[in-house]
Amino acid sequence: MGLSLATAERWVERWERQQQRYAVDREERFTVIADVVERAVARCPAGPLVVDLGCGPGSLAARLARRLPHADIVGVDMDPLLLELARTHHAYAARYVDAVIGDEGWTQALHLDRPLDAAVSTTALHYLGPDTLLRTYRQLAALLRPGGILVNGDHFPHDDTVLTELAGCVGRRHAERGQVLAHEDWASWWTAVAADPELADLLAERRRRQPDTGGDGAASLSVSAHERLLRQAGFRHTGVVWQYGDSHVVVAVR
């Protein structure tokens, strides 16, 4: 099921464009995550060890690899098609692992040889229910060294529905000004993928594993709910370090 570099490059570039519809000020959010990780691993005596949770086609892993060229980055995802795009287009950036975050034994599948310095994620953990999320946060806390960090960029609703609506308005206006809504959306991207014969086997495997997959999902837990779960999981410090509309970067320190 290997892909040509040209095919992977084409579909990753289209992925990058369509994702701009959903992540408010996406590039700045990536930059903030990299800033936080760089600060947290500055005193690591050896190359820092970082795991990218729900890495998709390697968007965040590639940016972190450029910022931290001596880091060992492990990308984990359950989508075989997106993983193959990452392995082909961003092969230099990370070691990629096929595993379902939160499932039994998923942390063993990472084959880590030392404690993590950082765990990062963007728009990937919102599909986990509260119980699975708490278990995952506890597992990550156990993998991280003291002082290690978890950095999660995602869309989170406010506890107050009025503020949630206003934050959504801010994000939509930003998207309109940037004209990113002209890009193809999630469903259109996958429809186009289905028409590419080079991706047929990977798409069939994806459908076999995820027969109910459809749509791009939406965060359901508020920032305060995530912070509460993180503290329960053993993180000492949790909070938001960046926000634009309903898009946040939440940091938790082990």
Image (cartoon, helix red, strand yellow):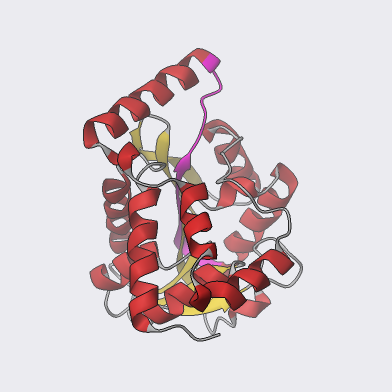
Compared with 29, 138 (above or below) is below
Q: Which residues are magenta?
A: 144-161
Examine the rendering and report whether any part of residue 254 can be seen.
Answer: no
Whether residue 135 is visible, yes or no, is yes
Q: Main secondary structure of the magenta part?
A: strand
Nearest to the observer: residue 105 or residue 150:
105
Residue 37 falls in which quadrant of the image? bottom left
Q: Nearer the viewer, residue 19 or 130?
A: 19
Task: Please check the rendered image and state whether residue 50 is part of the magenta-colored stretch, yes or no.
Answer: no
* In the foreground, 71 or 17: 17
Image location (x, y in percent) of residue 14: 36, 59
Location of residue 67 with respect to 95 vertically, above or below? above
Residue 41 screen position, x and y as percent:
33, 67
Give the image quarter of residue 169: top left
Residue 147 located within the stretch drawn in magenta: yes
Q: Position of residue 104 (x, y in %)?
A: 76, 68
- The image shows residue 62, relative to residue 72, as above or below, that is above
